Amino acid sequence: MNKAQLIDAIAAKSGMTKADAKKSLDATIDAVSEALKGGDRVALVGFGSFSVSERSARTGRNPQTGKEIKIAAKKVVKFKPGAELQV
């Protein structure tokens, strides 16, 4: 499912127009992104939780040349599914 299909599904299940469903989805994504950038954890009961984790620096390998490269430390988003979401 891509974003357009998700918007269609939201509109169909909620009775909203597609334009309103798109605005709602965009607002939700923006709110979650801002919270994660601020270092907060976002928990949606029954769906799951998003959190930010620090990935340490490490040494990798270029698959084309085989040369070792240094991969810098960075922050990554982690998602842990809730009990109702797990298949």
Image (spheres, rainbow, N blue to C red):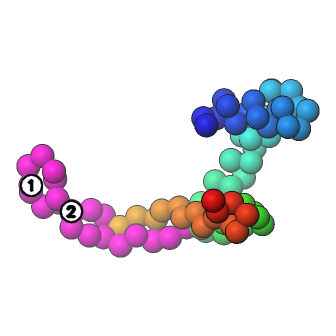
- The reply to whether residue 53 is in sight is yes
Q: Which residue is mark 1?
A: 66
Residue 27: x, y in percent? 75, 44
- In the image, what residue occupies the spot 40% across and 64% down? 74
Front one among 4 and 55: 4
What residue do we see at 76% from left, 35% from top? Answer: 9
Q: Identify which residue is drawn at 12% across, 61% down.
A: 68
Taking the magenta stretch, the answer to whether it contains residue 78 is: no
Tag 2, which secondary structure? strand
As drawn, is 68 to the left or to the right of 29? left
Q: Amino acid at mark 1?
A: Gly
Image position, residue 37 (x, y; %): 59, 60
Q: Residue at x 89, y 38 (%)?
A: 14
Three-letter amino acid code at disc 2? Answer: Gly
For the record, the magenta segment spans 52-72
Location of residue 29 with respect to 69 vertically, above or below: above
Q: Quadrant of residue 85?
A: bottom right
Q: Which residue is mark 2?
A: 60
- Choose between 16 and 26: the one closer to the eye: 16
Q: Quadrant of residue 49?
A: bottom right
